[in-house]
Image: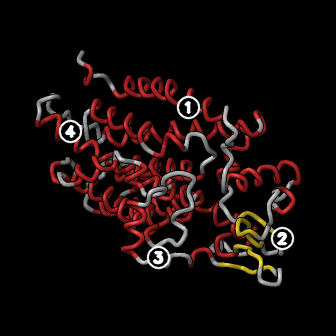
Amino acid sequence: MTTHRLPERSWTYIILLYLFIIYLPFIIARSDTVESFIQGDCYYYRAVIDSLLKDGDLLLANNIPADPLNGELAVGKGGGFVPKHPIIMPLVSMPFYILFGTPGLLLFNILDSIILILLIFKLNCLFYNHLIAFITTILYATGTLFLDYTYNYSPDVFSTALLLAGLYLMLRGRFYMGAVPLGLSIFAKLPNAPLAGVILLYAGFVILRGESTNGRIREQLGGKVMVILTIAVIFMIALAPFAYTNYLLFGSPVVTGYQRTAIAGADGQVLLVDHTGKFNQPLLKGVYSLLFNVRNGIILTNPILILAFMGAFWIGRIRFQNKIYLILLICLVQFILFAKYDEWYTSNFSNRFLMTFIALSSIFTSNFLDYLSHKFSLEAPIQEPNL
C-alpha cells in the first residue's frame, strides 16, 4: 500500500504521534520559564471555576486579584460583579481543575488544541487526498499561532473547535448533529453568531436543492421543510443554555456581559459600557493592521498564509464549489468583522480573534500544495474525497 493510500484513521494516529513529539517539549520548555499560561482573559475564566467551587455563585469580585472595574467583569441584574465572558468553557473544563488544579486547565487546552488540529485535517480530507491534508495539517500545527496557543487556557481555541466541528458535520450532511456544536459555539464566543448563521443558511440551501447526503432523514420526516425546521429547533435548544445563563445573570436571554461591562468613572463610580459597540475601526485601516501589523498581523505571524492566498487564486479547481465558497464566505465574514473591531490588537501573540479564518485558510493552502503536486507530478491523481 502506498503512503497516500493509508486510511484516514491511520493518518490520524500519525498526526497524534507527531503532536505528542512536538507539543510535549514545547509545553515543558514554556512551563520552565517564569511565564504562566494563565494570561489576559484566562484569569477571569479560571475565576468562574473558583467562584463556583468555593462560593457556589458567580460573583467574581472576591475571586480575582485585580480591580473589578478594569473592564473585565460585568454588572449583574442584582448589582454584583459577574462574568463578562461566556461561562461554558469554565464549566466544561471544571473537572480538569478539580482533578489537577490550575495545571489541569493547561491539560484541557492541550486536548482542545489537538481536537482543533484533527478537525483541520478532517476538513481538508473532504477536498484533498490524505497526504496533502496531512502535510497541510502539520504545517498549521507547528507553523501558525496554534502552536503558541497550546500553552494557554484559550477560549478562542475552544470556540473555534466547536465551530469547526459544526461546519464539518454540516459539510458531511449530518445537519442535526452539526446544529449542536454550532449553537454551543455562540455560547463560547458571541462573534461566532454570524459564522454559524452563514453555515445554517448553507444547510438550508443544500436541503432545498435536494443535495443532502442523508436521504434517510428526509424520508423519515417527510419533507425538506420539516428537516430545516428540525435543524432550527435543535440549534435553538443548543443555544438555550446561553440564553438561560444570560437571563440568570442579566435578566434577559439576549443581554450578555459584553453589553454590561463594568468600568470606573472619573469619580470612581461604576459605569456600564456596551462592548458590542466597539466596532468602529476604519475598514481599510483594519484590514491592513490585521494582515501586516508586526505583533498581531496574521501574515507576519503566520507566514504559511501566503500559501493560502496563492491557493485561493486556483479556487476554481477545487471540487465541490458550493462547499468551498461557503468556507471562503466564513473567512471573509470573520475577517471583515474584526477589521472593524477597535481592540483587534488584544492578543498575546498573532491574532486570536481570527483563529477560524486561519484554520479554514488551510483548505486553500492544500489547494496550492495539490496544484504543485500535479504540476510537478509529485503525487498520483487526487482521490475522490469521502463525502
Real-space Cα separation, disc 3 to disc 1, in angstroms: 36 Å
Question: Given the image, on which type of amino acid does mark 3 rest?
Answer: Gln
Residue extending farthest bottom: 267
Foreground disc of the pair 2, 1: 1
The residue drawn where x is 43% and y is 58% is 297
Q: Secondary structure at mark 2?
A: loop
List the residue tagged with mark 4. 370
Eyeballing the image, is 193 above or below 2?
A: below
Real-space Cα separation, disc 2 to disc 3, in angstroms: 32 Å
Residue 220 visible, this angle: no
Taking the image as shown, residue 139 lies to the left or right of residue 309, namely right
Question: Given the image, on which type of amino acid does mark 2 rest?
Answer: Gly
Eyeballing the image, is 310 above or below 253?
A: above
Q: Secondary structure at mark 4?
A: helix
Q: Residues within 10 Å of mark 2 (few under 14, many from 20)?
A: some
Q: Secondary structure at mark 3?
A: loop
The residue nearer to you, when weighing 131 against 65, is: 65
Q: Which mark is residue 26?
A: 1
List the residue tagged with mark 3. 281
Q: Earlier in the sequence, mark 4 or mark 1?
A: 1
